[in-house]
Amino acid sequence: MSRHRRVLRRQPGGAAGDWAAGAAGRARAEALREVGVDEVVEMAVQLALERFRSGDEAEMEFPSSFTSTERAFVHRLCQSLGLVSKSKGKGANRYLTVRKKDVSEAHAGMTCGLALRTKHAVRSLIQRFPVTNKEGTELLPRTERGNACAVESENKEVNKITFRLNDGIPQVPVKRGESEFDSFRQSLPVLEKQEEIVQIIKDNKIVLIIGETGSGKTTQIPQFILDDCYKNGTACRVFCTQPRRLAAVAVAERVAAERREKIGQTIGYQIRLESRVSPKTLVTFCTNDMLLGTLMAGDSTLSTVTHVIVVSILWSFMWG
């Protein structure tokens, strides 16, 4: 690995430097695959390290019950995540500690003060034109791009396996386009209550909406939120659950068609082992297990979600 770092320092820039950074990332990913550990252990270690990176703890410890192979996997994963790992002790008492690199001194003088008006302007621009993962990687120093690509790939795989919804930021929706379904939408009973429903959602944290099958609750209420946020220039991000995978896909495609968009733009879906979302997706239809998996993960994915809509709540479940 040290040979790759020397190559990166010698490159002044350009395609050669980018190729070397990509090669370093591929080498690290390949090194992780070479260390064969149980899938459950791999997922648990990845989740624990991600929480540690985003948390306030300065050091964490893995138990002495880890085998030498499992410790080797932790060492290589820590290296790809920019963490420092060290094994201590001997024999059955050998354990592993992980700590974050001390970079406080390096960044102590790197501050930038912005006026409140400027902060609002920057935030508005980021909400309207969010930075994609690819653009974020390109903004990193060349020596870190390989690590970022490897971590991003690992995070995507973890999300698929552990049934977790993707991260994102709230944005102001774009204006809905006219479509061939507009006349049908106007005939739906729920359209008569649009303003009332929107106002109730604004005034309450929890709202229970009851309506007949076919009244348009599932397809229209997420659009009520989008249209109101566009009208008022308010950022939003919505998760909408469906009881079945097929229903999540079908409803997402229908809503996207009603707004004259392609699936994966403003409207997307995420189900087990399949995802059609992008950085611009504001309404994500998903299955109940995807939302539950995200909640159980204890991460910050839902901290940027403004609305969660749970569809088809069974009365027997609610009232026992």
Image (cartoon, helix red, strand yellow):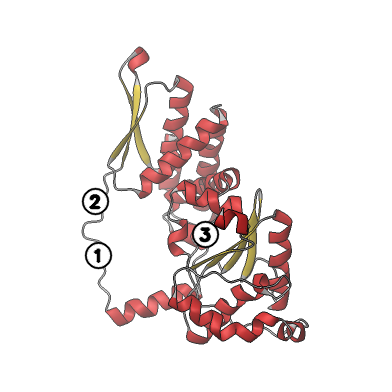
Residue 229 can be seen, yes or no = no
Q: Amino acid at mark 3?
A: Asn
The residues tagged by marks 1 and 3 sit, at their Cα atoms, a distance apart of 24 Å
Q: Position of residue 316 (x, y in %)?
A: 61, 55
Earlier-in-chain disc, 1 versus 3: 1
SS at mark 2 in the image: loop
Q: Does residue 286 appear to the left or right of 124 in the view shown?
A: right
In the rendered view, tell whether residue 204 sits above or below residue 278. Answer: below
Residue 193 falls in which quadrant of the image? bottom right
Q: Position of residue 64 (x, y in %)?
A: 37, 21
**Extreme front residue here?**
320
Q: Nearer the viewer, residue 23 or 254?
A: 254
Q: Residues within 10 Å of mark 2 (few under 14, many from 20)?
A: few
Residue 277 falls in which quadrant of the image? bottom right
Please identify the quadrant where the N terminus is shown.
top left
| Residue drawn at x 71%, y 86% as measured from the top left | 186
Q: Nearer the viewer, residue 38 or 17?
A: 38
Earlier-in-chain disc, 2 versus 3: 2
Q: Nearer the viewer, residue 168 or 302?
A: 302
Q: Amino acid at mark 1?
A: Thr
Read off the residue under disc 3.
133
SS at mark 3 in the image: helix
Read off the residue under disc 2.
104
Read off the residue under disc 1.
111
